[in-house]
Amino acid sequence: MTMKKFINNPDNITAELLEGLALANPKILEVTDHNLIINKGLATADRVTIVTIGGAGHEPALEGFVGEGMIDISVVGDIFAAPGYKAVVEALKLADKGKGVLFVVLNHAGDMLAGDRTMKEVEKLGLNVIKVVTQEDIANAPRSDAANRRGLVGCVPLYKICGAAAAQGKSLAEVAAIAQNFADNMATIAVACKTATHPQNGASFADLGEDEMEVGMGQHGEGGGGRQKMASADETAVIMAEALVKDLDLKAGEEVMVIVNGTGATTIMEMLLVFRRVHKYLSEKGINIVASWVEEVLTVQEQAGFQLFFARMNPENLAYWEAPAKTPYLSR
Amino acid sequence: MLNLFDFPIDTCYTEHKDVNDYGGVIMPIEPLKIKTLLLTAAQEIADHVDILTELDCALGDGDHGTTMKKLTKVMFAEIDSWDETTNLKVGLENLNDALEDVSGGSAGPLFSAFIHGMAEAANPEAPNSDTFIKIILLGAYDEFFATSKAVVGDKSMMDAIDPATEVIRHSTTDMKTTLIKAAQAARAGSDNTTGMLAKFGRARYIGDRCLGHRDPGSVTFAYFYEGLAKGYSA
């Protein structure tokens, strides 16, 4: 298992990358024990706060979006691995400024186990926490079977929207309702054409053939969809956009957010080609793109491919999306 | 708790049926025997992390071996301090506590649940080591099931744990033979996962493509029970 990556001791990757993140963004965030990445604005916050959990190895997500207007504390596990629940409980205690905490969990087995265990402790401690789960991957299960839908890039715009709602002084119940409404109206589909390697052991996740791509890929390189012949940007964009429109039941006249999220080894050039075709596809259907983002947001190491994300928007959510934020990888 | 553990055990068990089974001789639990048992089980897993990683690459995200390496490292560190005076219930509770601190994806909390079940069930007043071993292994199953909700056929750790537990639950023979049979049952259960479709974890997303591969979690527990059998005879 040969691996060509700029790393040091594989056991220390997570600790070192978090240290690097903190050193590069000293005004925005700090890193404490147990891999808690904390918004420096939390110290003086008098509002609902946002806490999330997840493994490392997906940079810039999740911890790269800690800061004012998005995440207050991101509890990072190890590479692709959820953190232990005790660190999460500690984060929720720390984050509670008397107005309650919104706790965002992506639907992956480890994260959900940690999330459920955390909520048991939260009840014992009497903390004011509401948990929202993101599960918007359309590849493996219908909307009615949300338990089998993975959480993909959709958590990131959700942090932005509920972070802005919290910043504007909304109550915990209101912030949770806004987050849940956004979560219920989002959908993602992923594609990969070259798989990645696990940076701690050099193992490659899957064996995609030279001329193959896989639609429905998860965000750890794990598969999950149809393998098919490698297609062009236009063809792939249409396959994916069609699936999302169908899942969300989008109709002419509706407004959407579109994200093309590169998973690590796909160029911005390729992503822009895809976005162009998606834009054309939606325009022809009379669906308006009111917010867009073409970027590496939530990556899977050096996996080549991207996630296409649509969310049905309303004016309230759009205003939250456009509201100020100051994080290492999203600022406005 | 420690006092209770040190309390002369014969006063507690004068009415216990098992006393006669040992000809009236009270055989207390031997912490060092349990220590060897668990350390050997951990070692058996640690010796095979590369295989676990390889299997996880076919089905999941390639980190199961890495996770088990982290978890067994904690086991070595914790269990190493046990001696002949160790209160095993406290020892197991501390072990679980340390395991819960590991960032171990889904295998972490599931493995912790298994050890947590051991700690919960551990009865320091058990009449002898063999009874104690049986009690903790049955307790491990209960907590694991409560956390995972998995059943046989789901292509998960349970495919090894359930058949091994059934052997232990119903065994009428000596513990050495029981553990060897439990290990064989765990291995056979794990091998059976080759033909199963996954209901849990990342493998459930790849559909038919998970056929032909063993579930890495079940393989971990096959090694675990094999390690117990080895450790008992050590």
Image (cartoon, coloured by chain):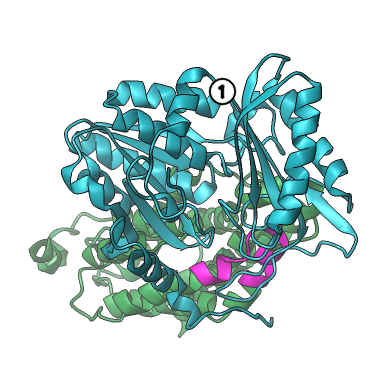
- Residue at 53% in and 68% down: B225
- Residue at 30% in and 70% down: B23
Q: Which residue is mark 1?
A: A313
Q: Horizontally, is A36 left or right of A323 in the view?
A: left
Q: Horizontally, is B90 left or right of A300 in the view?
A: left
From the top left corner, tell me how far across and down residue A85 is, in percent.
Answer: 34, 51
- Residue at 11% in and 61% down: B4
Quarter of the N terminus of chain A within the rendering = bottom right
Is residue B19 highlighted in magenta?
no
Does residue B108 sit above or below A96 in this rendering? below
For label 1, the SS is: loop
Query: Which shade is chain A?
Result: cyan
Q: Horizontally, is A260 left or right of B119 in the view?
A: right
Is residue B59 highlighted in magenta?
yes
Q: Quadrant of residue A311?
A: top right
Does residue A270 sit above or below B146 in this rendering? below
User: In this view of the protein, which residue sits in the foreground, A79 or A167?
Assistant: A167
Which chain gets the green colouring?
B
Q: Quadrant of residue B188?
A: bottom right
User: In this view of the protein, which residue sits in the foreground, A118 or B153?
Assistant: A118
Does residue A198 sit above or below A158 in this rendering? below
From the top left corner, tell me how far across and down residue B118 is, in percent.
Answer: 36, 58
From the top left corner, tell me how far across and down residue B48 is, in percent.
Answer: 59, 78
Label 1 amino acid?
Met
Q: What stretch of residues is rendered in magenta?
A: B53-67
